[in-house]
């Protein structure tokens, strides 16, 4: 039996998570990124248990896409996503509104061999330097199963408004661009996964999943260089807001998945209030069909 012990070590301003000898994830908590990319922590590279790539970093079309990251494009006029901001009047255009998300400290980093847990405090800071949000983030790496080629990541966060005024969480869709409701926890897949297969819960699938509510959604793609492919299964999870989580997903011109908390409806967060989110991603070392994903969707439900 291969060694599947989950370990974590701090390496050059990042946490490296390994299952045995395979580095399955690297959480970069203090990135070296230009302001144009709205610096924030991210996970890249992400790898399957066999070491196959399952994320991409700074693709030429969107340099601010970095593996898997927590972000927001429209937040009370500030852009914590990176890149240009959308408006109906000016389309995508550059503004002096690019905020950043700063790692403050880890409150716990631990491993018991079966799981790795990282808890941290972060500050969301606007372009003028104002502290708007205090975030408490928890990431748990777990569920290693070499027989099925699976590992899982649980992401939970509490976003407390400390601005001294209400905050409005939106998306390009809430600002007038149809079917562009990206917000929140966002995964960008390898370039070779472009054109992959989208499979969703309850018999749903394909590009019609964009903007829908579903318990889970998966992207199935093929690898370059090495044979075979893989699957990323995302569980929508929960939001403390009354606004439902809807899927932002694309297979063209690149593969992305995001359980968007504010796809087409803004979330209003009063000063002092907290927005809580919980999502789960499952990384699978083969190309799953619907039958297998139906079972995994039930098994990994939140």
Image (cartoon, grey):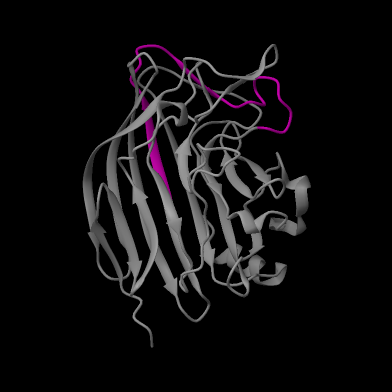
Residue 161 in magenta?
yes
Residue at image point 50% right, 31% down: 81
Residue at image point 76% right, 48% down: 207
State the residue in front, 59 or 259. 59
Q: Give the total number of marks visible in the rendering.
A: 0
Image-based side of 224 in relation to 251, left or right: left
Is residue 282 in view from this perspective? yes
Q: Is residue 252 above or below residue 190?
A: above
The N terminus lies in quadrant:
bottom left
Image coords of residue 243 (percent x, y): 59, 31
State the residue in front, 257 or 260. 257
Residue 8 in magenta?
no
State the residue in front, 161 or 125. 125
Image coords of residue 51 (percent x, y): 46, 70
**Residue 127: quarter of image:** top left
Image-based side of 242 in relation to 158, left or right: right
Q: Is residue 188 above or below residue 301?
A: above
Q: Which residues are magenta?
A: 155-180
Q: Is residue 17 above or below residue 21?
A: above
Is residue 218 in view from this perspective? no
Image coords of residue 152 (percent x, y): 46, 62
**Residue 275: quarter of image:** top left
Image-based side of 278 in relation to 189, left or right: left
Image coords of residue 78 (percent x, y): 48, 19
Residue at image point 60% right, 47% down: 257
Residue at image point 73% right, 57% down: 202
């Amino acid at each position: 039996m291969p060694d599947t012990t989950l370990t974590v070590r701090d390496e050059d301003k990042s946490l490296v998570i390994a299952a045995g000898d395979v580095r399955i994830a690297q959480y970069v908590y203090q990135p070296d990124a230009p302001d144009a990319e709205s610096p924030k922590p991210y996970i890249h590279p992400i790898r399957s248990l066999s070491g196959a790539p399952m994320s991409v970093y700074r693709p030429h079309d969107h340099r601010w896409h970095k593996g898997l990251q927590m972000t927001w494009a429209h937040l009370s006029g500030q852009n914590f996503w990176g890149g240009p901001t959308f408006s109906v009047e000016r389309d995508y255009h550059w503004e002096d509104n690019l905020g950043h998300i700063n790692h403050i400290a880890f409150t716990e980093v631990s491993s018991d061999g079966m799981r790795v847990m990282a808890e941290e405090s972060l500050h969301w800071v606007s372009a003028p330097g104002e502290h708007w949000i205090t975030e408490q983030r928890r990431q748990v790496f777990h569920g290693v199963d070499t027989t099925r080629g699976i590992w899982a990541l649980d992401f939970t966060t509490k976003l407390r408004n400390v601005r001294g005024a209400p905050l409005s969480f939106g998306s390009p869709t809430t600002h007038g661009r149809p079917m562009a409701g990206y917000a929140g926890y966002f995964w960008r897949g390898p370039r070779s996964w472009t054109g992959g297969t989208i499979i969703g819960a309850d018999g749903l699938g394909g590009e019609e999943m964009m903007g829908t509510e579903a318990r889970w959604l998966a992207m199935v793609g093929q690898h370059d260089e090495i044979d075979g492919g893989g699957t990323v299964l995302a569980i929508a999870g929960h939001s403390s807001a009354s606004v439902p989580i809807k899927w932002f997903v694309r297979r063209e011109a690149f593969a992305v998945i995001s359980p968007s908390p504010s796809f087409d409806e803004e979330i209003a967060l009063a000063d002092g209030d907290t927005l809580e989110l919980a999502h789960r991603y499952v990384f699978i070392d083969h190309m799953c069909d619907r039958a297998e994903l139906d079972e995994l969707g039930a098994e990994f439900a939140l």
